[in-house]
Structure formats: structure tokens, C-alpha cells
Amino acid sequence: MITTIKSDALTVKSKTDGAALTSIVADGVEYLWQGDPNFWANQAPVCFPIVGSLRDNRAQCGAGEMKGLARHGFAKFMEFEVGALEDDCVAYVLKSSEETKALYPYDFTFTMAYKVTGKTLSFIYKVKNEGDVVMPFHVGGHPGYNCPLFEGEAFEDYEIQFEKEEDANLMYPMADAPSLLDDANRRMILDHESVLKLDHGYFHNDGLFFDTMNSRSLKYVNPSTGKGLQIDFPQFMNLVLWTTAKPATFICIEPWVGMCTCSTDDDVFEHKANIQYCEPGEEKEYIVNVTVL
């Protein structure tokens, strides 16, 4: 099922399948990647209860074992229910089931909501613990944005402008275990700098994984025009930039709470970077705001 929400400046479509966005249009311009199986068939997967990958798709946790948990978790594969729908907002709801508990042994309600206000689209992630034990989790998004946005531009015309200077000494996937990030081999791409010019060369070996960050806001923009997006993620500690190794016309800008399993990590889920916890009966909310410039 596809739903549409609108403000005076934005028209946003999303679907119950994975609670994923399918379109972000402002002034007749489509900002969201429309999917292409020759490059990447997806558009904007939602990541829960993990981001990235676990070693061998499994980990130990306080409630037992997480096993068979694919990259970015199961939410992206699930059919959500529409919990609320108004002209300017929609909320999709996923509740734990025997199917989810076979992978992740917790009782939960996960709500993925979208709200438009003027030129801003808010991604609202809500995680509620419906069980009687503490629940660990990661959460995040994987939206792909068209790059370039306008005819006559190139991918390399765009840049990421961070709100603060970053020391980005990044890990990359291990050659013999690509689901893991290699903590022993890093590459410095920003050294007390705040601007990263986009280049397909960065993505020959997967994405750019920012496991530590100073910024909680960035602009994805063509500096010659000032057109693009501002993305604010005050509660998110991590970020991934990704596109396909085969040069494509999109860039994923992914605020995460959490990170992929690193080569030096053990397999206890509670030991993962920036793990979050919900006490029994507690609900936590995380918001990303995306504003058209």
C-alpha cells in the first residue's frame, strides 16, 4: 500500500512494505532515488533492530541468541500496518511476532513515521519495549538521494558540508570477511576538515563508515548553486555515505545509532558501538530532519 503526505512545499510517498519512502518531490524535482536493479533496486530501507551486519548474522544477547539476522535487520522485509494517516504525516507500525522473535528474542513495537512541515521531511523512529527484560537495539535509515539532482550536473559537482570539522579516519570492509569492518586498517579522508567533495572513487570498496563524529548536521549540496538538502540528526552518533561501486546517480546519506560489527568486536550484542537500551515499558524516539535547500 502506498500513502501520500503533503505540505505546501513537499509531496512525499511511502509504503507499508518495509515502511520505506518511495518519493520526495519539491518544485517538481524528485529528490529520492527511484531504484534501478542495474545498480541498486532499493530506495530507502529502514534499519532495525541492527544497522550494518553481525558476524555470521548472529550474536549473543541478554535474552538469548540473535541468529539469522541479515544486514540492517528484518524491518525492511516486513509488512507494516498503518497506525495513523493524516494529510501531513503517516505512521507505520511493526509489532514483534513469532517470526521476529526467532531472529531477535524481544517483544517490541517499532513505529516508523514521516511528517512534512514546509520544506522539511521528518523521519521519526520510535522503539518501545513491550517485554519484561531490558531490550538492546540499533536503529537507522538507508535513504538514497538522487545525485545529481538537476539536468546538466554531475555526481562530482556535489559535496557533503559538515557542520563541524571532522577527523575522519575510517574503517573499510575486510577483504576476506566483507560483512565486518577492519579496525586494523583505516584511511584518513578528512583531517580537521568540514567538506567532503563527492567522488565515485571513495566507493570502490563499499561505503564511508563514520564511527565517530563531531557533527550532528550536514548539507548535501552543489556549492555552485546552493541547491540540495540539509540533514539534521541530533540523536544519531554515526553516519554512512554509500553508493554502488559501479558509478550510479545516487548517494545514500544514512544517520545511524550504532555501527557494523568490527573485526576487533566480540559477538555480544550489548558490546556493539552505541548500543541503545529500552527498559520494560519504555519507548525511545529518534528524529532526522531533511530540509530542501
Image: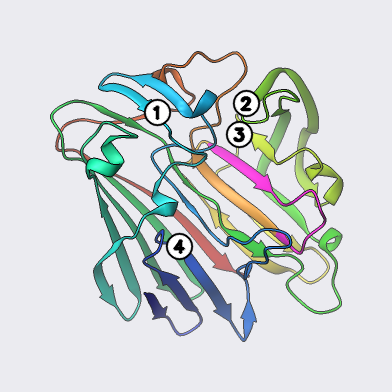
Q: Is residue 154 left or right of residue 9?
A: right
Distance (Cα) linking label 4 and label 2: 26 Å
Pointer 2 residue: 180
Label whose residue precedes the other's in the sequence (4 or 1): 4
Span of residues in magenta: 238-250
Residue drawn at the location 37% of the way across and 55% of the way down? 78
Distance (Cα) linking label 4 and label 3: 26 Å
User: Is residue 219 highlighted in magenta?
Assistant: no
Amino acid identity at mark 1: Lys
Distance (Cα) linking label 2 and label 3: 20 Å
Pointer 3 residue: 213
Label whose residue precedes the other's in the sequence (1 or 2): 1
Pointer 4 residue: 20
Q: Quadrant of the N terminus?
A: bottom left
Label 2: state its secondary structure.
loop
Label whose residue precedes the other's in the sequence (4 or 3): 4
Quick check: 119 above or below 202? Answer: below
Amino acid identity at mark 4: Ala
Within-10-Å neighbours for mark 4: few <14, some 14–19, many 20+: many
Label 3: state its secondary structure.
loop
Label 4: state its secondary structure.
loop
Label whose residue precedes the other's in the sequence (1 or 3): 1
Amino acid identity at mark 3: Met
Pointer 1 residue: 67
Within-10-Å neighbours for mark 3: few <14, some 14–19, many 20+: some
Determine contact: label 1, label 2, CB under 8 Å. Answer: no
Amino acid identity at mark 2: Leu
Residue drawn at the location 69% of the way across and 21% of the way down? 182
